[in-house]
Image: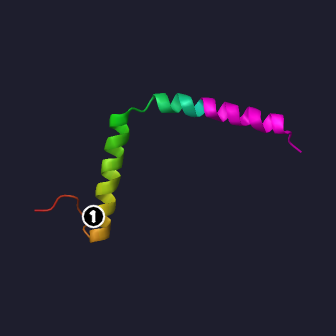
Amino acid sequence: MRTIESILADIDQLKAELDILRQSLDNVTIKEALEVEFLYESNRIEGNTSPIQG
């Protein structure tokens, strides 16, 4: 059985890894990814297969 200390140590290690990954992302990158996802989902809901309508 794992001790609370070993579980907390794992949590600390995972938090440190997450912090490193977060540094590589900036707000612009996140915003662009969310815009693409929003556009895709909006088109899916409307039944469109292409994000460009003419």
Is 9 magenta? The answer is: yes
Instruction: Please provide percent x and percent y for residue 24.
Output: 45, 29
Instruction: Please provide percent x and percent y for residue 31.
Output: 33, 42
Residue under circle 1?
Answer: 43
* In the image: residue 29, left or right of residue 53: right
Rendering quarter of residue 48: bottom left
**Residue 39 drawn above or below residue 17:** below
Quadrant of the drawing holding the C terminus: bottom left
Residue at 34% from the left image edge and 61% from the top image edge:
41
Is 7 magenta? The answer is: yes
Most distant residue in the bottom direction: 47
Quadrant of the drawing holding the N terminus: top right
Most distant residue in the left direction: 54
The overriding secondary structure of the stretch rendered in magenta is helix
Residue at 31% from the left image edge and 66% from the top image edge:
44
Q: Secondary structure at mark 1?
A: helix
Most distant residue in the right direction: 1
* In the image: residue 25, left or right of residue 36: right
**Type of amino acid under label 1:** Asn
Instruction: Please provide percent x and percent y for residue 34.
Output: 35, 48
| Coloring scheme used | rainbow
Classify 10 Å Cα crowding around label 1: few (below 14), some (14-19), many (20 and above): some
Instruction: Please provide percent x and percent y for residue 39.
Output: 28, 56
**Residue 29 drawn above or below residue 51:** above
Rendering quarter of residue 4: top right
Range of the magenta residues? 1-16
Residue at 69% from the left image edge and 32% from the top image edge:
12
**Residue 37 drawn above or below residue 28:** below
Residue at 75% from the left image edge and 32% from the top image edge:
9
